[in-house]
Image: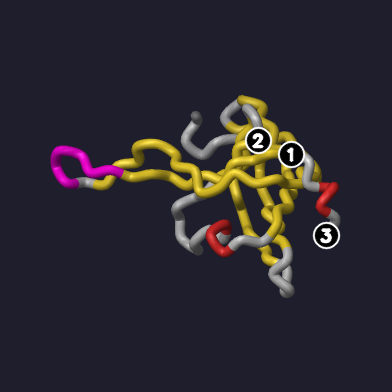
């Protein structure tokens, strides 16, 4: 991987949780895992109509240098990547077998509407 291709500064975030007055876990805000340089590559997009509303989805591939702490857990807690004002939901994280970089398959938007 050429370092010159990593031109976009992005922030990898995970959902933070707190306990409410009843001891239930609630999603409070997003916490930063790391801020790294990345290469953003659009893959494609699609439009759909649901309940009479037109929606669109943009697929993006984001490549960063490998770090162990950037590998999201294989759970339902969704991590995301913030690039400026844009939000990308991480669908899959694919590390290179040499552990030189990670390729994130993402869709644009926010899971919680923020």
Q: Are marks 3 and 2 in contact (CB under 8 Å)?
A: no
**Label 1: element kind:** strand
Residue 102 versus residue 50 in the image, above or below: below
Pointer 3 or 1: first along the chain: 3
The quadrant where residue 81 appears: top right
Residue named by callout 1? 8
User: Closer to the camera, 91 or 80?
Assistant: 80
Q: Residues within 10 Å of mark 1 (few under 14, many from 20)?
A: some
Residue named by callout 3? 1
Look at the image and say whether residue 19 sits in the magenta stretch. yes
Q: Main secondary structure of the magenta part?
A: loop
**Label 2: element kind:** strand
Look at the image and say whether residue 15 sits in the magenta stretch. no
Q: Are marks 3 and 1 in contact (CB under 8 Å)?
A: no
The residue positioned 69% from the left and 69% from the top of the image is: 99
The residue positioned 63% from the left and 27% from the top of the image is: 85
In x, y percent, where is residue 7?
78, 41
Task: Report the Cα–Cα distance between label 2 and label 1.
Answer: 7 Å
Residue 26 versus residue 101 in the image, above or below: above
Q: Which residues are magenta?
A: 18-23
In x, y percent, where is residue 75?
46, 60
In x, y percent, where is residue 78?
50, 50
Side of 19 where 17 appears, left or right: right
The residue positioned 56% from the left and 61% from the top of the image is: 71
Residue named by callout 2? 83
Side of 20 where 63 appears, left or right: right
Task: Report the Cα–Cα distance between label 3 and label 1.
Answer: 15 Å
Q: Are marks 2 and 1 in contact (CB under 8 Å)?
A: yes
């Amino acid at each position: 991987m050429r370092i010159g291709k990593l031109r976009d500064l992005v922030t990898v975030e995970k959902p933070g949780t707190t306990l409410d007055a009843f001891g239930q876990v609630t999603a409070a805000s997003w916490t930063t895992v790391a801020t790294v340089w990345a290469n953003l590559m659009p893959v494609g997009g699609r439009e759909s109509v649901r309940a009479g509303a037109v929606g669109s989805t943009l697929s993006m591939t984001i490549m960063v240098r490998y770090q162990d702490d950037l590998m999201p857990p294989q759970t339902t807690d969704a991590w995301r990547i913030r690039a400026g004002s844009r939000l990308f939901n991480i669908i899959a994280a694919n590390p290179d077998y040499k552990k030189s970089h990670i390729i994130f398959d993402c869709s644009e938007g926010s899971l919680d509407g923020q």
